[in-house]
Image: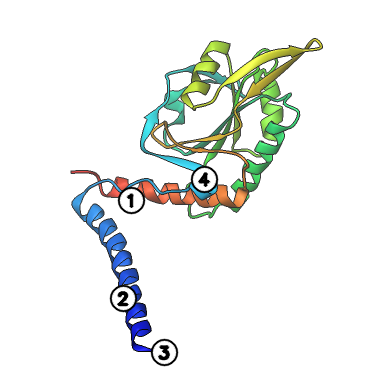
């Protein structure tokens, strides 16, 4: 190996070490200084994490057990929320199955989230029908129904939309296909776009949880 090549390789190695040191040093500085740690970049998992979680709209709806649910009801736990409906022919069953698979992949050392189906078809999705549907996927799967405009406002708060249309006398609902991750403060923390990979969902949740935990333990001064 000639001298110029050795010098070039040595310089490149120094640059790699310098960049790595700057990245690590920045994280340490942010933690030590009390500055909030930036949200993790999870673009490779189709996930966008808000640096500042967004508050959800106030709402009053009914769950699958006929119980009243408000925004305050979401506090204290992580929640994967999805806008859909029980008669959905394709997107919703696949989405719910992906969430069930994700639930089984999560480490038991992590907080175990709830999974919430916000119906876009309250005329047909009664509490009884939601209970039968969500119960198939697991005991931590729940549903919300109630006033159509309240549901629409909640969906928008989760960065989702839905539109009703009638085809050959049958109601069809076009709706968003992403998952919204709600933190234990009842705030929108992240959006996870399809296609959904359960392994990626589990990893994204763990990284978001650890990031949020680190910021809670090092509050901004």
Give the residue pinned by disc 3.
Answer: 1
N-terminal-most mark, 4 or 1 = 4
* Residue 19: percent from left, percent from top: 31, 64
Which residue does the numbered mark 1 point to in the structure image? 214
Callouts 2 and 1 close, C-beta under 8 Å: no
Residue 137 visible in the current orientation: no
Q: Which residue is label 4 attached to?
A: 112
Q: What is the CA distance from the residue labelled 3 to the residue labelled 2?
A: 15 Å
Secondary structure category for the residue under label 2: helix
Q: Is residue 140 above or below residue 133?
A: below
- Determine the secondary structure under disc 3: loop
**Label 4, label 2: how many angstroms apart (C-alpha)?**
47 Å
Q: Quadrant of the N terminus?
A: bottom left
In this view, the residue in front, 203 or 186, is 203
Q: Tell me whether circle 4 and circle 2 mark residues in contact (CB < 8 Å).
A: no
Please give the name of the residue rendered at 25% of the width and 45% of the height, measured from the top-left corner.
Answer: 219
Separation of residues labelled 1 and 3 (CA atoms): 47 Å
Secondary structure found at label 1: helix
**Classed neighbour count for the residue bearing mark 1: other residues with Cα under 10 Å, few (<14), some (14–19), many (≥20):** some
**In front of the other: 39 or 102:** 39
């Amino acid at each position: 190996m000639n001298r110029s090549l050795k010098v070039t390789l040595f310089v490149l190695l120094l640059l790699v070490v310098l960049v790595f040191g700057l990245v690590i040093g920045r994280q340490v500085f942010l933690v030590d200084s009390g500055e909030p740690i930036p949200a993790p970049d999870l673009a490779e998992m189709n996930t966008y994490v808000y640096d500042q979680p967004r508050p959800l709209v106030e709402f009053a709806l009914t769950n699958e057990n006929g119980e009243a649910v408000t925004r305050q009801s979401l506090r204290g736990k992580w929640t994967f929320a999805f806008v859909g409906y029980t008669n959905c022919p394709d997107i919703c069953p696949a989405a719910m199955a992906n969430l069930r698979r994700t639930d089984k992949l999560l480490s038991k050392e992590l907080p175990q989230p709830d999974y919430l189906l916000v119906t876009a078809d309250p005329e047909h999705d009664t509490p009884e029908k939601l209970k039968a549907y969500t119960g198939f996927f697991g005991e931590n799967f729940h549903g919300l129904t109630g006033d159509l405009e309240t549901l629409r406002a909640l969906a928008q708060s989760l960065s989702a939309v839905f539109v009703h249309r009638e085809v050959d006398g049958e109601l069809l609902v076009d709706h968003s296909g992403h998952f919204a991750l709600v933190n234990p403060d009842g705030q929108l923390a992240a959006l996870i776009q399809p296609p959904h990979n359960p392994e990626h969902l589990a990893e994204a949740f763990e990284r978001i949880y650890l990031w949020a935990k680190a910021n809670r333990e090092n509050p901004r001064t």
